[in-house]
């Protein structure tokens, strides 16, 4: 049995047999990673999720990209199906959700409630399905290539030993203009081999967390756009024995989005104007931690982001006017707006420093602590976006 297969079997056993609810996690990192408050539509959907589905939720928050109506969405590592069912409400009856997971017990739970959520959402036909398989081998699981508008994943890629295979498959199954939007755990430096030998640390995501810079180089090498960092939170490890094992390595959760772009896309900057037509985002659309598009306000973006807006599902929601300027800067956003206007100039010598989840987490001042008693919806009830400097996200049982 190969090392990768051994790790997969350990993770399957950990989530399928050892963990029965979110509170069973043995470390202080995975069960309640802070995310931005979901929009009204997502909150309404969460209130309809079956309690057993929410109880077996082990993700990093909530992965809900904007403008999902009618989309075909694939959830990589769908677990009990919580995120799938939330998204199935948001895509509507004309959209479709597919969840893929390797764990027998979690697939059984997710299958169990298809009809339940169909009835809750008032759909004539179910728009959700679940497939057992490995996200490193989507083709073997029967997932069709070039067939999805959006891919999501929630604290799962850190559990996979072969990250390259995951992103290669993600690229293949996305349509041109499609997006991968996911939350995961990241390390402040490359991890040593000793750390990767502990099965509990693998199950909790610590041993398999990507060094954040490696994510950027990997996805760009495979043909995706430059990643956009949406939000981030520091992870506070509370247990002394875990701190001893991880040493100087720091951890953060980060939500990134990136796109499968056409090879012949223009590299010219553009002036773009958001129309205010995306559901729950009528006044402004916060695309990432740098770019916030206010309704009816024209702003200049670099060539790559212009291509993203032209070729993705966001195209109908923007007026895009290509300028005759030269090719955009390649090392960061052309126009820094929002959180990172200071940090970008302060560390301009470091390529892609605006994509560092640790810098954004420090700026937002948020921290993650143990959630020993999971709320029924799997999220802390007191979530707020952008807490003041030094403020920690409270645990669910506080």
Image (spheres, rainbow, N blue to C red):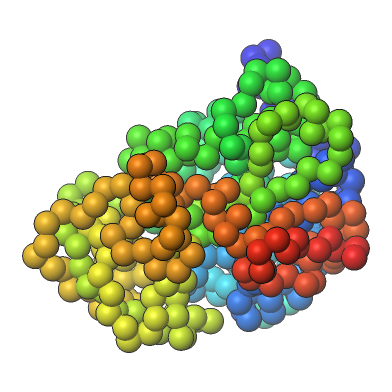
Towards the viewer: 168 or 182: 182
Q: Closer to the camera, 276 or 80?
A: 276
Which quadrant of the figure has residue 2?
Answer: top right
Q: Is residue 289 visible?
A: yes
Relative horizontal placement of residue 109, taking residue 292 as reference (left or right): right
In the drawing, does residue 336 fall left or right of residue 231?
A: left
For the point 57% across and 65% down, the residue is: 64
> Furthest residue to the front?
346
Q: Is residue 79 above or below residue 39?
A: above
Q: Where in the figure is residue 96, as x and y percent of width and height?
A: 54, 63
How far across and how far down the image is residue 281, in percent? 49, 81
Question: Is residue 328 found left or right of 335 in the rendered image?
Answer: left
What residue is drawn where x is 31% and y is 71%?
315
Q: Is residue 65 left or right of residue 19?
A: left
| Residue 340, position as x, y percentages in the image | 45, 60
Q: Is residue 285 above or below residue 171?
A: below
Q: Quadrant where the N terminus lies?
A: top right
Q: Quadrant of the C terminus?
A: bottom right
Counting the numbered discs, the total is: 0
Name which residue lies at 45% across and 75% down. Answer: 285
Residue that lies at the very extreme toward the top in this rendered image = 1
Residue 34 visible to the viewer: no
Residue occupying the point 31% across, 47% down: 331
Compared with 66, 202 (above or below) is above
Residue lying furthest left in this view?
A: 324
Q: From this view, report whether residue 74 is shown above or below residue 341.
A: above
x, y percentage for residue 269?
19, 62
């Amino acid at each position: 049995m190969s090392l990768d297969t051994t790790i997969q079997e350990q993770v399957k056993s950990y989530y399928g047999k050892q963990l029965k609810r979110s509170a069973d996690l043995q470390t202080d990192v995975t069960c309640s990673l802070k995310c931005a408050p979901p929009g009204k539509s997502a909150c309404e959907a969460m209130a309809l999720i079956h309690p057993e589905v929410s109880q077996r939720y082990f993700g990093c928050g909530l992965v809900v990209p904007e403008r999902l109506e009618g989309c075909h969405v694939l959830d990589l590592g769908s677990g009990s199906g919580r995120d799938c069912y939330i998204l199935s409400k948001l895509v509507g009856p004309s959209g479709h959700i597919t969840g893929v997971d390797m764990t027998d017990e979690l697939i059984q739970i997710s299958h169990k409630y298809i009809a339940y959520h169909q009835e809750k959402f008032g759909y004539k036909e179910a728009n959700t399905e679940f497939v057992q398989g490995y996200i490193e081998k989507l083709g073997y699981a029967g997932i069709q290539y070039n067939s999805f508008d959006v891919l999501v994943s929630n604290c799962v890629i850190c559990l996979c030993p072969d990250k390259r295979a995951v992103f290669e498959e993600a690229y293949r199954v996305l349509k041109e203009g499609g997006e991968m939007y996911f939350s995961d755990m990241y390390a402040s430096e490359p991890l040593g081999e000793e750390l990767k030998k502990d099965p509990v640390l693998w199950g909790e995501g610590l041993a398999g967390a990507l060094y954040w810079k490696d994510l950027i180089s990997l996805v760009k090498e495979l043909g995706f756009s430059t990643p956009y960092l949406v939000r981030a939170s520091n992870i506070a490890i509370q247990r002394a024995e875990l701190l001893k094992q991880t040493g100087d390595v720091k951890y953060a959760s980060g939500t990134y989005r990136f796109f499968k772009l056409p090879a012949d896309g223009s590299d010219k900057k553009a002036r773009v104007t958001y129309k205010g037509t995306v559901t729950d985002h009528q006044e402004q659309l916060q695309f990432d931690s740098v770019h916030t598009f206010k309704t009816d306000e024209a702003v200049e973006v670099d060539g790559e982001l212009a291509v993203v807006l032209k070729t993705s599902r966001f195209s109908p929601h923007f007026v895009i006017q290509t300028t005759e300027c030269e090719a955009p800067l390649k090392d960061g956003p052309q126009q820094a707006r929002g959180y990172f206007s200071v940090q970008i100039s302060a560390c301009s010598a470091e390529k892609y420093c605006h994509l560092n989840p640790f810098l954004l987490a420090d700026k937002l001042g948020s921290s993650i602590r143990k959630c020993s008693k999971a709320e029924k919806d799997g999220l802390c009830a007191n979530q707020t976006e952008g807490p003041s400097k030094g403020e920690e996200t409270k645990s669910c049982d506080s």
